[in-house]
Image (spheres, grey):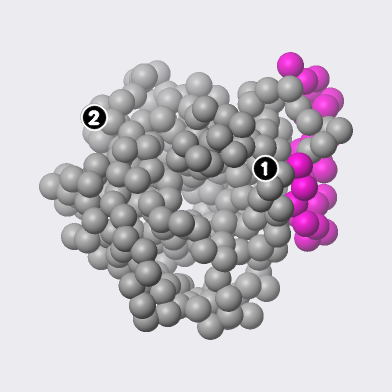
């Protein structure tokens, strides 16, 4: 296990990189020993980012087996979403506000009540008692122009798994009738239907993802409060947008989330 000083140094490095808009790089000689150390560095980075305002929820990353293998892990990873980075749809985003924007296509969940950390372990059924609403959503990835051939999970954890924010579509309170394992989704990009999948593409169901995140949060002492948003993993291939791009992500039976991209 890495020392407290080593973990703190990594958090300070990531803070400085974001401040100076540097290109992302793996930790290299500063590599921490374990995923737990990576989470500890992430938590310290979030503390250093107090000027960004309160945490508004959480994200789940590395939900597919291929990306887990690429990053050298056998499990997903969780990260923080700041409240000020949660936007309503339709959203207009400028590439200049990010250091390397990419779009992911997800189902978001809002907690309808506080989730007690001692109520777990949670599974895909028990966690549903705490779900107040669901939304079609974009996750805004800020990969800081990373070289994807050099990825590892610990380094990414220390960079808050690249979360740049969320765009939320319409709130759906009556989500219980939707088959979360197989509900169709599709992407319309610049007027053309380009990708299709289903809501189970990330971990089998968004509720499985949510239960995994709730167990992680309980283990690490992250609060899960009423009103917080959780994005549950991408159902389609990630897209780095260009100026002028227009994306509409549809979860059938739930509606559309929309974004337009400028310079």
> Considering depth in this image, is 75 or 98 the residue closer to the camera?
75
User: Split into 4 quadrants, where in the image is the C terminus?
Assistant: bottom right
Locate residue 172, reporting x and y percent: 24, 56
Position of residue 210 in the picture relative to residue 75 (left or right): left
Position of residue 174 in the picture relative to residue 142 (left or right): left
The crowd level at tag 1 (other Cα within 10 Å; few <14, some 14-19, many 20+) is some
Q: Note whether residue 111 is visible.
A: no
Position of residue 67 in the picture relative to residue 225 (left or right): right
Locate residue 258, reporting x and y percent: 39, 71
- Helix, strand or loop status at disc 1: loop
Magenta stretch encompasses residue 4: yes
Position of residue 16 in the picture relative to residue 258 (left or right): right
User: Split into 4 quadrants, where in the image is the N terminus?
Assistant: top right
* Residue range of the region highlighted in magenta in the rendering: 1-26
Q: Earlier in the sequence, mark 2 or mark 1?
A: 2
Q: CA distance from mark 2 to mark 1?
A: 33 Å
Q: Note whether residue 149 is visible.
A: yes
Residue 146, quarter of the rendered image: bottom right
Which residue is identified by label 2? 125
Residue located 13% across and 47% down the image: 177
Residue 89, quarter of the rendered image: bottom left
- Between label 2 and label 1, give the one nearer the viewer: 1
The crowd level at tag 2 (other Cα within 10 Å; few <14, some 14-19, many 20+) is few
- Helix, strand or loop status at disc 2: loop
Which residue is identified by label 1? 151
Check the image and report above or below for 67 versus 148: above
Check the image and report above or below for 52 versus 60: below
Residue located 49% across and 48% down the image: 56
Question: Magenta part mainly helix, strand or loop?
Answer: helix
Locate residue 125, reporting x and y percent: 23, 29
């Amino acid at each position: 296990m890495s020392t407290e000083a080593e973990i703190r140094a990594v958090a300070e490095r990531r803070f400085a990189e974001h401040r100076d808009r540097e290109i992302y790089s793996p930790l290299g000689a500063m590599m921490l020993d374990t995923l737990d150390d990576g989470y500890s560095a992430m938590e310290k980075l979030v503390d250093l980012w107090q000027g960004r305002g309160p945490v508004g929820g959480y994200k789940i990353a590395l939900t597919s087996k291929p990306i887990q293998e690429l990053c050298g892990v056998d499990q997903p990873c969780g990260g923080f979403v700041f409240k000020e980075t949660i936007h309503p749809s339709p959203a207009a985003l400028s590439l200049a506000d990010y250091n390397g924007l990419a779009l992911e296509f997800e189902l978001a969940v809002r907690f309808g009540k506080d989730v007690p950390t001692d109520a777990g372990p949670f599974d895909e059924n028990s966690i549903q008692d705490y779900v107040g609403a669901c939304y079609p959503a974009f996750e805004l990835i800020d990969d800081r122009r990373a070289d994807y051939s050099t990825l590892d999970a610990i380094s990414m954890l220390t960079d808050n798994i690249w979360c740049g924010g969320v765009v939320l579509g319409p709130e759906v309170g009556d989500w219980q009738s939707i088959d979360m394992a197989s509900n169709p989704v599709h992407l319309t990009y610049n007027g053309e239907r380009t990708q299709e999948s289903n809501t189970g593409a990330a971990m089998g169901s968004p509720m499985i993802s949510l239960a995994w995140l709730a167990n992680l949060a309980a283990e690490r002492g992250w609060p899960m409060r009423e009103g917080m948003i959780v994005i549950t993993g991408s159902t389609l291939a990630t897209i780095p947008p260009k100026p002028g791009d227009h994306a509409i992500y549809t979860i059938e039976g739930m509606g559309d989330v929309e974004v337009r991209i400028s310079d």
